[in-house]
Image (cartoon, rainbow, N blue to C red):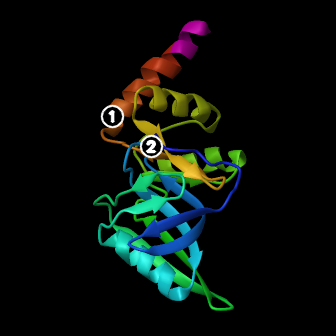
C-alpha cells in the first residue's frame, strides 16, 4: 500500500546506490506505480544519475517502502545548480496539464482542472466543475494520484469526449432540470 505523506516532510529516494532527498512527488496509487512529477535534491551527479536511471526504466525506492516504476509515458527532466555543490532535479511527464492535473493548494484545484478540461471538446460551466469532478471520479474517468510534500493531482483517462458530455448532461444537468 502506498503511503501519503502530506505534511511536507522530506523523504529519501534511492536507486542503484544513489540517494537523493525529495520535497514532493506525484504518483499512481498502485503497487509499483509510475511517477508523474518529482522534485529531488543532491549533488549534481546524484540528481542527474537518479533521473537518468528512472528514465531508463530502473525502479526508485522511497524510505517509506514505496517502489516506483517508469511507465511508457514520455518524460522530461532537468537539473539546476543551486549553489554549494548542490543541484535540484525536476522530472515530469509530457501530459502534465492535459492528462495529469496537479496543484499545491486547494484554491488551485478548480483552476488547474478547468485548464485541463478546456483542452478537450467538453463544454462546462465553472460553477458546476466540482460536481463534474465528482462525477468523473465516480465513473473512473479521472483517478486521484498519490503524493507527498503537499501536492495533489488527478490522472485523467479522458477517452471519448462525447461519452463524457452525455454523462454530464444526463447526471448533472438532467438532475438540475428535474429539480426546477
In percent of width and height, residue 174 lies at 49, 15
In percent of width and height, residue 159 lies at 31, 41
Seen at 55% across and 50% down, the residue is 147
- Work out which quarter of the rendered image holds the C terminus and state it: top right
Residue 118 shows in this picture: no
Numbered tag placed on residue 107 in the rendering: none
From the viewer's perspective, is 59 left or right of 109?
left
Q: Distance between the residues labelled 1 and 2?
A: 27 Å
Q: Which residues lie in the magenta part? A: 175-180
Seen at 34% across and 61% down, the residue is 70
Position above or below: 169 against 25: above
Residue 133 shows in this picture: yes
User: Which residue lies under the disc numbered 2?
Assistant: 29
Q: Dot 2, how many residues are within 10 Å of its Cα: few (below 14), some (14-19), or many (20+)?
A: some
Q: Which of 156 and 52 is in front in this view?
A: 52
In percent of width and height, residue 161 lies at 35, 39
User: Which residue lies under the disc numbered 1?
Assistant: 162
Q: Which of 139 and 79 is in front in this view?
A: 79
Position above or below: 69 against 86: above
Taking the magenta stretch, the answer to whether it contains residue 177 is: yes
Q: Nearer the viewer, residue 88 or 171?
A: 88
Prevailing secondary structure of the magenta residues? helix
Taking the magenta stretch, the answer to whether it contains residue 112 is: no
Q: Earlier in the sequence, mark 1 or mark 2?
A: 2
Callout 1: SS: helix
In percent of width and height, residue 15 lies at 41, 69
Seen at 43% across and 19% down, the residue is 170
Amino acid at each position: 500500500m502506498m503511503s501519503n505523506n502530506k505534511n511536507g516532510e522530506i523523504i529519501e529516494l534511492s536507486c542503484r546506490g544513489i540517494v537523493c532527498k525529495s520535497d514532493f512527488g506525484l504518483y499512481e496509487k498502485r503497487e509499483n506505480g509510475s511517477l508523474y512529477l518529482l522534485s529531488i535534491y543532491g549533488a549534481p551527479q546524484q540528481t542527474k544519475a537518479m533521473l537518468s536511471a528512472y528514465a531508463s526504466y530502473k525502479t526508485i525506492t522511497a524510505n517509506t517502502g514505496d517502489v516506483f516504476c517508469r511507465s511508457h509515458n514520455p518524460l522530461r527532466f532537468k537539473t539546476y545548480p543551486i549553489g554549494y555543490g548542490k543541484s535540484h532535479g525536476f522530472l515530469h511527464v509530457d501530459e502534465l496539464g492535459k492528462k495529469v492535473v496537479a496543484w499545491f493548494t486547494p484554491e488551485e484545484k478548480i483552476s488547474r482542472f478547468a485548464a485541463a478540461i478546456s483542452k478537450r471538446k467538453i463544454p462546462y460551466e465553472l460553477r458546476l466543475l466540482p460536481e463534474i469532478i465528482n462525477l468523473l471520479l465516480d465513473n473512473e474517468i479521472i483517478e486521484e494520484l498519490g503524493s507527498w510534500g503537499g501536492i495533489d493531482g488527478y490522472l485523467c483517462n479522458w477517452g471519448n469526449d462525447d461519452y463524457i458530455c452525455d454523462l454530464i448532461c444526463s447526471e448533472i444537468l438532467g438532475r438540475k432540470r428535474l429539480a426546477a
